[in-house]
Each structure stands twice: as C-alpha cells, then as structure tokens.
Image: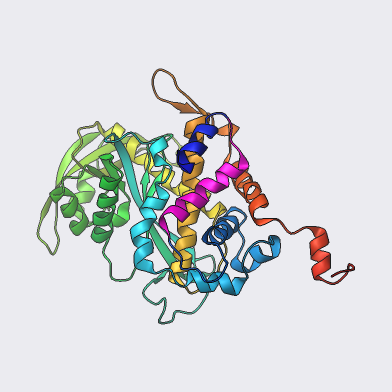
Amino acid sequence: MSNKRQIARRIKKEIRAEDCSEIAVEAINRHLTISINGKLNQKTIIRSLVGMSANKLSVHSINKAVEKVPCETSVRYHLSKVDLDSLLALQSKILTYSNDQILVPRKSHHFAIDFTDDPYYGECVDVNKDYVIKSKMKDSTTTFYSYVSLYITTKGQRLTLAVLPVKKGVSKVEYIRKFLVFIDDAKVNIEVLCLDRGFYSNDVLSFLQKENIPHIVPVKKHGQELKKILRGNHSRYARYTMRGTSGPLDLTLAIDVQYLQGRNKKFGNVNLGYVVYGIDWKPRRVYQVYKNRFAIESSYRIRNIVKAKTSSRNVVLRYLLTIISFLLKNIWVALQWMVFSKVQRGPRSINNDLFRFDLFRLFVWEGLRKKLKFVTFVAVLRSLGRLEGG
C-alpha cells in the first residue's frame, strides 16, 4: 500500500500532526526532482520549504529555528537547479495531490479565475524583468509578482487546481486556454466559469463562445447603448452587440435588479448586468452564483497566512513558494472534507469550527518538529558560547 493510502486510511480515524506535514512533503517530493549533491536529502529541503510556509519564515530564518536543515547557501544553490518550465508542468499535479479524496470524476463544478499580486520591493533586472508587473500603488509599492489561479467555488470543495505566474505579453485568453487543459486533466466538468470585469473583452468572450464554455462575466458600463439597457425596474434578459477589432460579438445579458432600501444611505434600484453563455438561469440565480466567485478572495487570504517570506529576485523560488502556500490550503480543505463533514441526505456539510486553518498550520509545524529537530534554548546559548562546550 502506498504512503498516500496509508495516511488517508489513518486520517479517517484521527488526524496526526505528522500526517498534515507529510502529505505536503509527499505531494512535492513525488513530482519534483531536485538534483542533490553529497549527503543532503531532497525531502529535507522540501520539509524546510514547507516549514517556511507554515510559520511564515524565510530561507534565512528557518535555519535559525531548526537544526536539521541545510544552510541558506545550500538551499538556494539546490533550488536554483529547478527550472521554470518543469515547475509549470508539475504545479497542477502537486496542487491536486489530495483532490481524489474530494472530487468525483466527471462531476460538474463552478470555477473562477482571478489574479493576485505579491508586493516586490527590489529592482527589476534581466532575470525577472518579464515577471515583475507594474500596477496601482499597494503596500507601498507599484511593482509586483502576479499570479493567476484556477479555483473551484463549489461549497465544501473549494480547491485551487492550478496557479501560474503572470508573464508580460501573455494574454488572458492564453491563461484561460491553459486552465481548460488543467480542468480536463482533473477529470471534472465545467458547469459555469465565473470571471471578473478584467476579462470583459471581445477577445475573451469570443474565445469562450467558440470553445462552448458556460460563463458569467459582469459587464462594464461603457457607452450610451449599454447604459440604456441597464436601466429598468425588473429582472430580465437582454441582447447586446459588443464592438471590437475582431468584429462585432452578440452577447446575452442577464440583468438582476436589486432595491437598495437605504443600504449605504442609498435608495432606488441598481441593475446588475452579466454576460452569460451556456446557462439558462433566472437573473437572480446568476447573481447568486457569481457572488460565490468571491470565495477565491478568501483563498488568497488563507494563502497569505502560509506565504513564506522572501526578497529573492529568483522567479522560480518565488513561484515554488507560491505553489506550496496554495497546496497547504488545498490539504486543509481535503482534511475538512474527509474528517469533519457529515454524510447526510442533501448537500454534505462541514463543521469549519472543529478544524480551523490556524490549527492546521500549527499541526504542520508540529509535524515537522521531529523531522527537522527544533532548536532549543540550550542550543541557542551554546551557539553563542555562553555554556560550557559551546
């Protein structure tokens, strides 16, 4: 029996700290190969990276917290051997390592695609110039490493299937095309794909129609014709022709009307328009399904809790740490589904309060304790030469 099955069988009875950490280590170790020199073990490097994420440490600070890790220079040297193309090919396999515990083959799901930015305070040089993105001021900087992720928004099964670094010159259509491949590889189907206003363009919408992908995209209120369509007192469907360099594109709009009733000191109604394709839902359901897309924002907040610190210019190192942060979130979702969900008539429900993410993060860190051997206070004093034998 494989180690993965042994852990899965044991977890159904109890969750152990070492299982939480070893699932993450095995997910990476099974797919990623790092060329190692000398007696150093690949798993030791991977455990160091997982430990960095679990406790928001850097390559420098993890070396101060645990004993059985290679020095900072050695870690950086060996990770420099990992190439970006290999990581791009492997990232979805790493992220979906535990998904077979949740996802039913060929079942349809709601998906979302979105971008998240990591602030970068260093210089833009030849090694990273294609991946440092300029954007609006946030966290005291206008330069970022940006990532685009594919996410399942179905309640209880909110998993990140893939995450890619944003590269200058690569279109949104190209990212969507790649994500469609990952969805097919995961052996699940698309019930609907929810995209934000950043994807509202002729190129994206025409591509989705040609690929016959059911989708929801909120409209941008540009032009008098569209503003006129988005005025009314009842929910409805409407037709609209989008103009673009590639020619006119016929769109179907679902318009949900909501009455403000004094919310934010406003009254009257608001017309919420969405481009829809491949679905036959009432406008209110379109609104409610699209609203669930914002679950991807919570995935970014969780991911930031376990985002290791780095000031490196190395695109591959930053990307690997990003993959690990999303992996830890996925493992937590899988454990909640396996252990803390009720099998009952109707939808499966999960008691989130029994296993919060902060508790899972502590389990991961504790699970690494025996493997990496935490530095004790006595060891610190000895390293400073303040005890005999130091």
| Quadrant (top left/top right/bottom left/bottom right) for the N terminus | top left
Residue 70 vs residue 112, the one in the foreground: 70
**Relative side of 285 to 26, left or right:** left
The x, y position of residue 206, in whole percent, is: 16, 53
Residue found farthest to the right: 388
Taking 207 as reference, is 64 left or right?
right
* Of 378 and 43, the residue lying toward us: 43
User: 42 left or right of 294?
Assistant: right
Q: Residue at x 63, y 63 (%)?
A: 69
Residue positioned 20% across, 45% down in the render: 213
Q: Residue at x 28, y 47 (%)?
A: 185
Whether residue 340 is situated above or below residue 170 in the rendered picture: above
Q: Nearer the viewer, residue 11 or 285?
A: 11
* Picture mark count: 0
Tell me where the magenta segment starts and ends, as one range.
14-32
Q: Is residue 21 magenta?
A: yes
Residue 38 spot, x, y in % from top left:
55, 71
Looking at the rendering, in which quadrant would you find the C terminus? bottom right
* 214 up-or-down from 84: above or below: above
Residue 108 percent coordinates (x, y): 28, 35
Q: Is residue 230 magenta?
A: no
> Which scheme is used to colour this image of the protein?
rainbow
Residue extending furthest toward the bottom: 126
**Dominant SS type (magenta):** helix
Residue 8: x %, y % from top left: 49, 36
Q: Which residue shows up at 38% across the image and 40% down it?
A: 153
In the image, residue 358 sits, relative to residue 81, either above or below, namely above
Q: Is residue 255 visible?
A: yes
* Left or right of 24 on screen, residue 362: right
